[in-house]
Image (tube, rainbow, N blue to C red):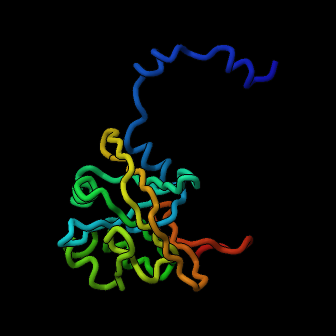
Amino acid sequence: MMALEAAAAALPPLQALRRAACLPPGDFRMAMRRLAGAVCIVGTTDGQRPTGLTATAVTALSAEPARLLACINLKGSTFRSIADSRRMSVNLLALHHSDLATRFGGAGPGAGELFEPGRWDTLTTGAPILRDALVSFDCVVDEMMVAHSHAVMIGEIKSVQMHPGRHAPLLYADGRYTTLHPQGETTP
């Protein structure tokens, strides 16, 4: 019998696993730093004022119907605006947007001022779209699920805008911004 088969045959009861201590938050954060993620700005508006944040917990959900999901911290004003308006944009950033990602990540001015340095527009829903993003998804929030400190927002994609140029995507890994490099090359 192989080691994996032996381990599967001796699975601990699920109830015992649920009662066991959780992974300490510091260990979780250190492990998750190894998970590279595309950097996006998730934006919304209440009809008067846009707000947004930097996010890496964004992924495709389904192609038919076209859906994506974004995990949004419950503590911020962006969550409240998305929950109220039920609309959001997801703007995939290029490497040259790292300063913008930092500002939307909380190292910049207040929410109203965040949108000044970029070239912003709207498509179908009225949510802010970064004109030179690699791609922008304009969504209506189809479903929202709250889990602990975050909400999982499922966005029904109403329109998309793709930048015609070919730029390197902005990624976040190991606590810093980076991008993809051809095999054999490393980041500076």
Q: Is residue 156 above or below residue 42?
A: above
Q: Position of residue 57 (x, y in %)?
A: 45, 55
Among the 4 quarters of the image, the one containing residue 82: bottom left
Q: Where does residue 38 sit, x and y in percent of width and height?
A: 51, 64
Q: Residue at x 65, y 74 (%)?
A: 181
Q: Horizontal placement of 99 versus 17: left or right?
A: left
Which residue sits at x=17%, y=72%? 48
2 or 73: which is nearer to us?
73
Instruction: Give the quarter of the image for residue 12.
Output: top right
> Left or right: where does residue 6 sit relative to residue 57?
right
The residue under the point 68% across, 20% down is: 7
**Left or right, 171 with reference to 120:** right
The N terminus: image quadrant: top right
Closest to the observer, 25 or 36: 36
What residue appears at the point 43 percent right and 21 percent down from the top-left corner?
Answer: 18
Image vertical order of residue 30 relative to residue 185, above or below: above
Task: Return the x and y of residue 107 as percentages of the image width and height.
Answer: 28, 71
